[in-house]
Image (tube, helix red, strand yellow):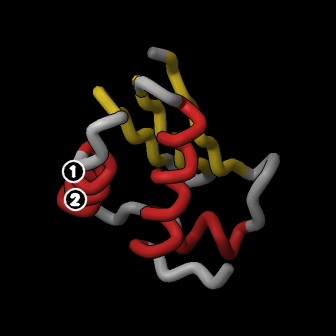
């Protein structure tokens, strides 16, 4: 088991992408966390969303697999083009 942090901030992500990742309310945050936690490899998750960054912090059995799963879900949920 390990910890995984996926961070989107002004240091690594442009403003247009960060605006798409914004969580306007608690309901959206809760929905996103529920979708992440559907993956059995992820035990716990915290979502930190501020005006200039979004961080997804998880405890997972396999951090590589968890990272791929979270990125895949993020792309789908926020409708990013790859």
The one nearer the camera, 9 or 74, is: 74
Q: Position of residue 50 (x, y in %)?
A: 50, 47
Give the number of the disc on residue 63: none
Q: Position of residue 79 (x, y in %)?
A: 49, 82
Q: Residue at image x 54%, y 57%?
A: 71
**What secondary structure is marked by label 2?**
helix
Q: Residues within 10 Å of mark 1 (few under 14, many from 20)?
A: few
Query: In the picture, residue 31 is in which quadrant?
Result: bottom left
Q: If the image is split into quadrants, where does the C terminus sit?
A: bottom right
Q: Position of residue 39 (x, y in %)?
A: 30, 46
**What secondary structure is marked by label 1?**
helix
Vertical relation: 75 (above or below) 43: below
Circles 2 and 1: CB atoms closer than 8 Å: yes
Residue of label 2: 31
Vertical relation: 23 (above or below) 57: below
Q: Residues within 10 Å of mark 2 (few under 14, many from 20)?
A: few
Give the number of the disc on residue 34: 1
């Amino acid at each position: 088991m390990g910890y995984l942090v996926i961070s989107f901030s002004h240091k690594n992500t442009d403003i247009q992408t960060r605006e798409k990742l914004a969580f306007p309310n608690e309901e959206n945050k809760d929905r996103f966390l529920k979708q992440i936690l559907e993956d059995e490899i992820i035990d716990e998750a915290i979502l930190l969303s501020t005006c200039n960054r979004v961080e997804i912090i998880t405890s997972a059995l396999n951090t590589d697999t968890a990272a791929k799963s979270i990125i895949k879900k993020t792309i789908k949920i926020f409708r990013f083009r790859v």
